[in-house]
Amino acid sequence: MRAAGEGEGEDPVAGDTGFDVRFFTPLRRETYAVWEDASREVAFEDAPVVRPFVSRPGRRVAPGWWWSATTGRLVHFGSAVMRTHVMLLDRDPQVRALACRPLELRWREDGCVRAYAPQLMLRLGDGGGVLADCTVRGEPSARQRRLAHVVERACAAVGWRYWLLGPVEKVYQRNVTWLSLYRHPRCHGGPERARALQAVFCGGRPLVEGAEEVGDPIGVLPAVFHALWSGALAADLSVPLHERTQITALVRAPR
């Protein structure tokens, strides 16, 4: 992997794509490299946050950390909108790893070195990389459009993808937020209970009826919600969850 200029005043060695990248190794050594090389050779999903979010007075939601069921690690987030998308990506079966701001892209524009750290980096099941940003509005601002164009160009140059994640339907968000409370493996209930849930809901059944048939709902419902989170059970999450929600067994390949 070719190194790039390490001083802020030095010209970046950007290679064919016109981009270089700044990141930290797992041992927190600051590193600069040519983007097309690093995109193939560096496991950015394992890299520390290159530019943490900071708390600002007057904001309703301060930066925080999300425990990821996908990786078993904490993922940093900077806003309520970003936290929502981290949650949804954590449940997405095509996502195998996610990290917050593990890299900063650098490029030359109008004679100056520009730098931007996309909010999220994802690794998909096919091994492909994704950079992503979250927006509050359905229509991104002019600045977001400009940066999205730059990051999209950087991703396309190395075979990655760029996602600009917009507003989420509120009922679906509330349902997944509830299920996320049961995402930890301790809520799984064990192999025997998982098999019982598959058998009870194989043809479709109201939530409370199936839970009562398996056992005491107080002990069974956490396993039902965990299975809905993981995809072993399915329900229509576009309408509010309730005790009569129709649940169907839907076995998903393990991660």
Image: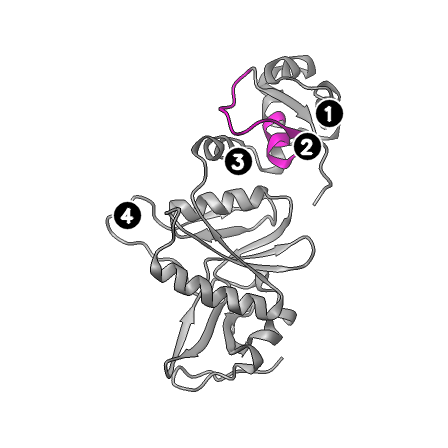
How far apart are the two marked residues, 2 and 1, measured between alpha carbons?
Answer: 8 Å
Give the percent coordinates (x, y) of residue 243: 54, 16
Label 3, label 1: how many angstroms apart (C-alpha)? 20 Å
Q: Disc 3 versus disc 4: distance between alpha carbons?
A: 24 Å
Q: CA distance from mark 3 to mark 2?
A: 14 Å
- Mark carried by residue 198: 1
Q: Residue at x 51, y 77 (%)?
A: 20
Q: Earlier in the sequence, mark 3 or mark 4?
A: 4
Q: Which percent across, then down, holds residue 8? A: 40, 81
Q: Earlier in the sequence, mark 3 or mark 1?
A: 3
Q: How many marks?
A: 4
Across and down, in percent, residue 83 comes to 44, 46
Residue toward you, 69 or 114 = 114
What residue lies at 41% left-to-right and 72% top-to-bottom?
115
Q: Amino acid at mark 4?
A: Arg
Foreground residue among 181 and 12 = 12
Q: Which residues fall within the magenta stretch?
A: 224-243
Task: Please determine whether, in this image, residue 155 is positioned above or below residue 30.
Answer: above
With respect to residue 154, does 129 lie above or below? above
Residue underneath mark 2: 232
| Membership of 182 in magenta stretch | no
